[in-house]
Amino acid sequence: MIEEQIRSEMKTAMKARDADRLKTLRSIVAAMQIKSTSGKSATSLEDSDVIAVLNSEAKKRKESIAAFTEAGRDEMVEAEQAELKVIGEFLPEPLTPEELSQIIESTIADNGFSSPADMGATMKLIKPQVEGRADGKAVADLVKSMLAG
């Protein structure tokens, strides 16, 4: 499980006295705890839930990098990039544009989808295949263009 791997890495970072890595790992664990207790009772997270938390944390870092770059805060950009790198270690390998196109094309062909009206049904089938490995907006845009053409 990814959650166990993150906690193990956190212990390793503590022993190695790697303060920057430890800070990032602690923020991930805190976000996972918030996610696990957001329901009526605390539950352990599935890998898909952990990936969703990691994607959310990565998105926050990317937004911060953009804001700090615009403000000329190079030291903050470097810190956020370092955190993003640590988060990326636990995320699944992203799909290449070719792999994503192939998944979408085969889903459309296998199910006989042909018009923009099939967008929702197509996305419903594609989402589990690409979750955590591709940006949702990019997937939706590509599906839309394939169904329109």
Image (cartoon, rainbow, N blue to C red):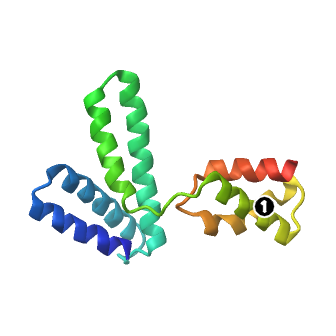
Q: Is residue 73 above or below residue 29?
A: above
Count how many numbered circles sit on residues in the image: 1
Left or right position of 23 against 55: left
Would you identify the image quadrant in which residue 134 lies? Answer: bottom right
| Quadrant where the N terminus is found in the figure | bottom left
Q: Neighbour class for label 1 at 10 Å: few (<14), some, many (≥20)?
A: some
In the foreground, 65 or 53: 65
**Label 1 belongs to which residue?**
105
The amino acid at mark 1 is: Glu
Q: Where is residue 103 in the image (x, y as percent from the top left)?
A: 71, 64
Q: Where is residue 99 in the image (x, y as percent from the top left)?
A: 65, 59
Give residue 115's quadrant in the image.
bottom right
Nearer-the-camera pick, 9 or 40: 9
- Give the residue displayed 71% in from the left and 69% down from the top: 125
- Residue at the spot 37% in from the left edge and 70% down from the top edge: 36
- Answer left or right for 65 relative to 24: right
- Give residue 40's position: percent from left, percent from top: 41, 74
- Going 30% across and 75% down the picture, which residue do you hit? 4
Q: Could you say where residue 44 lies in the image, as x and y percent from the top left?
A: 37, 77
Q: Name the side, left or right, on which 116 lies relative to 68.
A: right
Name the element at disc 1: helix
